Image (spheres, grey):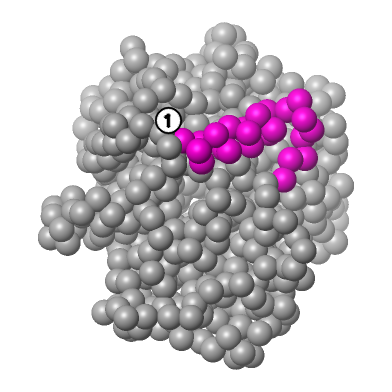
Amino acid sequence: MTPSLQIGEALLDAARETMRRGASYLLSLQKSQGYWWADLTADTTLESDFVLLELWLHPPKDGVWNPPTKDLIDKAARSILDRQLPDGGFNIYAHGPSEINATIKAYTALRLAGFAIDSPELSKARERILALGGLQAANSYVKINLSLFGLYPREHAPSIPPEGMLLGNIIYEMSSWTRAIVIPLSILNARGGRRPVPAGMTLEELFVPGVPLTFKNNEGFLSWRNFFLKADGLLKLWERYGSRTIREKAIRKAEQWVLQHTRYSGGLGAIYPSMMYTVMMFDLLGYPEDHPDRVEATNQFMNLLVNDRRGFYFQPCFSVLWDTAIAVYALGESGEATAASMERAADWMLAKEIRRKGDWSVKRPNAEPSGWAFEFDNEFYPDIDDTAQVLLALHHARAGNSTKQEACQRRAVNWLLAMQGSDGGWAAFDVDNNWNFLSSVPFADHNAMLDPACPDITGRVLEALMACGMHASEPAVQRGVEFLKRNQEIDGSWYGRWGVDYIYGTFLALRGLRAAGEGDREAYILRAGEWLRAIQNADGGWGESCASYDNKTYMPGPSTPSQTAWGVLGLLASGDTNSSSVHKGVEWLVEHQRADGGWDEDYSTGTGFPGVFYLKYHYYRHSFPVLALTAYRKARGVSRT
């Protein structure tokens, strides 16, 4: 037996034992109902926004702010302070640099919580804010939120007119999360007035002297940006002199839209910002505290709060369907799950299939409803990525009722096919949501105004369709393949919209292409594999910083379990099963496994809004290594343990 073969067999044995321990640990995390559910965590902006929400709901009396929720506000302040960086600022991803918007929000929340303006914490934060450009450099949502309290001049905050509700289906040309945020916010913008703040509270100290507050136009005179800036000026005149009748009609239509979309959901859009604005909207419109809709909205929002031994923080939403589908797929591929655990998971997922028409049906009115959401309940917003991942999970997990499962899978496949865009790709929630000029509106700087097709979701959908028995020659599959070919980066990678970043996009694109029958000798596949090998860290793992989104190119980061697993999975899908890069990646996963079978990961590898909001999926570090180690063993000719 040659030394290289001995090394190969030793690594295969180590991969097998590591995978088994990882699968056992992953199985231990399953809830009795059949699902997996980890915390989903982000940054301090959520706790900071909570303090501002409490100021809205419990305004000062005679200039003194003594809210009934002071205990929670104090906990929020401590939670925020625990994450202050040495330079005084606050970041938006783990181990990232200070970021202007997060720091302004934290500073405001801490001041409201009672910290003195000359305290060391606020002094350092203020210095960092001014160094980063001051309040003038904040994004539109910070300015809008502060303007509701007179802490930023309303005339220099973007207008969000509710009259957009009267313009047909134009709201459905915005991304689903944007419309869920701006529709209740438009009511606050139109009716909010100026809410009181504690006596003497201003943020004047955060303005950089001599820097104008006017909107910036970096696109030139003959541009959509300039058009929308002029339109914003006209809207501000309309707000002062326009028809009250039309405005009230628009407000009522927006209110009814919100009310409708809170049905069958864990809050509007089931995401933090829209849920927060909904609570504020009900308060503004005079809904009593005991009104059922207001009570439900408040309870759903507060359900996002973690306040126990784990700490005090808000989750941006619940990732339960996502966590479950990825875990089930990894376990199903490994062959390590018991039939009973997989059946419980399959039964739970089938019960969560969405059978009502949601916003997606505006553009696909004839498609039969199906699909899965990200959260426990969010029936207006099934998403394509979750649906594809659930189908991959159900490829392995057999429910108690096989007839029901087969019918469900057929519906879901047909729904995915109906949701394919005209460019051949798949987006998150909508079809052909790509009016690029809308990204130039003043309140679009959350960098997610649209929901265009993206390589990561398209790759996952292709893999799911092929797992469900679709043939590579089908037009939908070929169009998806062509989309990926057209959208490959010059360096051979693919952009990852929903995970950080190019490693994520590349591994999913390659898996989709391999499933669709693309040969691993194709030049563009070889380029992708070479790119993955070129960016591998010296320790054998892979890591990428969220800064990739800011720089629009790969930015290296420390190796993480999830990204190392993605790197290995990508190389295997490219046809590379025996290079030193693959072996070193597997070795990294083996060597970094904990004694209990899990892995540690202290970096943000999930994406909410690129450049603006990032996520930590706390089960990524456990599920993806199991999948990668299983794929490695299969690629080396070992089908089962």
Q: Is residue 43 left or right of residue 319?
A: right
Q: Residue at x 60, y 91 (%)?
A: 119
Magenta residues, dominant SS class: helix
Whether the magenta-drawn stretch holds residue 89 is answered as no
Give the answer, above or below, for where 90 lies relative to 3.
below
Q: Residue at x 26, y 79 (%)?
A: 68
x, y percentage for residue 544?
A: 73, 55
Please tell me whether residue 65 is drawn above or below residue 153 in the rendered image: below
Give the labeled residue for mark 1. Answer: 164
Q: Most extreme residue toward the front, as rendered?
A: 241
Part of the protein shown in magenta: 216-238
Left or right? Give the position of 161 relative to 129.
Answer: left
- Residue 85: horizontal and vertical position, in percent? 67, 78
Q: In the rendered image, is residue 83 in sight?
A: yes
Asked if 24 appears above or below 484 in the picture, the reply is below
Mark 1 burial class by Cα count in 10 Å: few <14, some 14-19, many 20+: some
Whether residue 257 can be seen here: no
Q: Residue at x 12, y 60 (%)?
A: 290
The three-letter code of the residue at mark 1 reads Gly
Q: Is residue 90 above or below residue 303?
A: below
Q: Is residue 630 left or right of residue 523?
A: left
Along the line of sight, the residue nearer the viewer: 359 or 517:
359
Residue 433 lies, in percent from the top left, at: 53, 25
> Looking at the picture, how far across and down is residue 319, in whole percent?
42, 52
Viewer-side residue, 531 vs 404: 531
Would residue 249 appear left or right of 487 to someone viewing this image?
left
Picture quadrant where residue 95 is located: bottom right
Q: Is residue 224 shown in magenta? A: yes
In-front residue for pair 583/504: 504
